[in-house]
Amino acid sequence: MTDPNSMRAFVNSKLAERPNPLWTEMMKIMDAGADVLGNHLINIVLKSKLYKEIEAKDLDNVNFQFALITGIKSLVANYQIALLALLDVAM
């Protein structure tokens, strides 16, 4: 359980209030930097700038290969995982 006097508990309680001036101010800040935030999230998830980062670290002698693999699974009552679909796209 989180300490009710913690900063996290305070912020969460304020975000839960309606109307919410704190959330309104946070949205203004996030909206102002939405493009930068979005680009960073895309890079983190999809590694879209990975080759530039590798070049910046001078790792030219190392061979990297990547693949994007996605799948859909189903968890049944007995906790067995069933693979419903799999897509492998070489990058």
Image: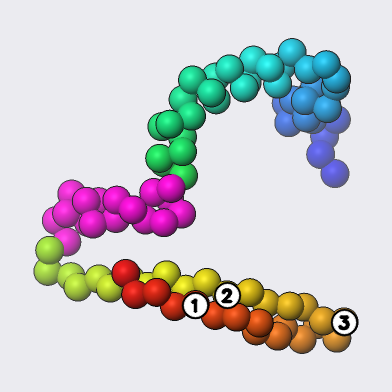
- Vertical relation: 33 (above or below) 58: above
Q: Secondary structure at mark 1?
A: strand
Which residue is painted at 43% across and 48% down in the image?
A: 42
Pick the residue in front: 64 or 83.
83
Mark 3: which amino acid? Answer: Ala
On screen, 18 above or below 80?
Answer: above
Specify start and end residues of the magenta stretch as a single range. Answer: 42-59
Residue pointed to by mark 3: 77
Element type at mark 3: loop
* CA neighbours of label 3 inside 10 A, class few (<14), some (14 to 19), many (20+): few
Q: Left or right of 87: which side holds 15?
A: right
Residue 77, picture quadrant: bottom right
Which quadrant is home to the C terminus? bottom left
Q: Which residue is mark 1?
A: 87
Residue 3 relative to residue 87: left or right? right
Q: Left or right: where does residue 73 sit relative to residue 66?
A: right
Asked whether residue 52 is drawn in magenta, I would say: yes
Q: Are marks 1 and 2 in contact (CB under 8 Å)?
A: yes
Main SS, magenta region, reads helix
**Distance from the alpha carbon under mark 2 to that under mark 3:** 20 Å
- Single out the mark in the foreground, 2 or 3: 2
Residue at point 22%, 51% (across, down):
52
N-terminal label among 1 and 2? 2
Q: Horizontally, is 13 left or right of 11 in the view?
A: right
Q: Crowding near pointer 1: few (<14 within 10 Å), some, many (20+)?
A: few
At which x and y percent is residue 18?
85, 20
Residue 36 vertical placement versus 64 (above, below):
above
Residue tagged 2:
71
Question: Per the image, is 58 magenta?
Answer: yes
Of badges 1 and 3, nearer the viewer stands 1
Percent x, y for residue 31? 53, 23
